[in-house]
Image: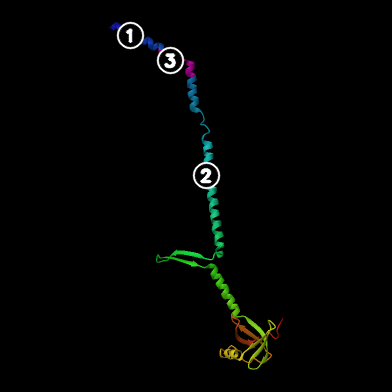
Amino acid sequence: MTKHNEQFEHQLDKHFSERKKRHTLSAEQRDALTQLSQSAVHKKPTRFLLPLQMNGLACALVVLGFTMFNTNEKQTTLNTYAAQQSNYHFIEVHQVDSAGSYLSEITTQKQQLDDKLAADLRLHQQRYIEYGKLVSVDDDWYIASCHSEVLIQIKDSLLNDLNTKHAIESGITMGDMLAMAHNSQGQIIALKHAGNGVKVCRG
């Protein structure tokens, strides 16, 4: 058996040596493989990161620009609508008061402006003064208006009413220039001297 084992050992060594010769690299092959592995270690990284960084930067700039443009547009829009609030007939105001109750009211913006204009017009009409010359006096007064070719007759009943309200200035005589104050309905509410500045009708 020992012989058999020796023979087997010998064949195994022979077979191992032959395989080793067939699969062992020559010195040239080893040098080439060493140089290849060393050049792979020292090789510069590929230019993969630069395009990726540029794409990321471009995306960030686009987002930043869009955000800034959108913010500016919102502010412009808010200012535009704030300036045109007067064009709306109604403005609804919703709020919570200090007690925590929900309040809402409708403000009629245009209506308020129209009411103010009407009030100003009424005030102007109330203060409307017509000038004329007292041309005749009997029970009634006759005044020639400076504003038109109209003879105004003021009946005794109105003269008595104005006297009780102390709306007729004392000392008025025929030939005087008078100032007649009218209310919004065109009614005469006061008679006074026209003053030193009005001596004759201008026309």
Question: Which one is earlier in the sequence, the residue at label 2 or at label 1?
Answer: 1
Q: Give SS at disc 2.
A: helix
Residue farthest left in this picture: 1
Residue farthest right in this picture: 203
Which residue sits at x=58%, y=77%? 122
Label 2 is placed on what type of residue? Ala
User: Label 3 belongs to which residue?
Assistant: 23
Is residue 190 depicted above or below 106 in this figure?
A: below
Which residue sits at x=54%, y=56%? 75
Residue 57 location, x and y as percent?
53, 42
Q: CA distance from mark 2 to mark 1?
A: 74 Å
Does the CB distance between marks 3 and 2 fall below 8 Å? Answer: no
Is residue 56 depicted above or below 38 in this figure?
A: below
Q: Give SS at disc 1.
A: helix
Q: Is residue 23 magenta?
A: yes
Q: How is the image coloured?
A: rainbow
What residue range appears in magenta? 19-31
Residue 90 location, x and y as percent?
52, 65
> In the displayed structure, does residue 175 sit left or right of residue 93?
right
Residue 84 location, x and y as percent?
56, 62
Label 1 is placed on what type of residue? Phe
Does the CB distance between marks 3 and 1 fall below 8 Å? Answer: no
Tell me the tag on residue 60. 2
Tell me the tag on residue 8. 1
Label 3 is placed on what type of residue? His
Q: Nearer the viewer, residue 106 or 33?
A: 106
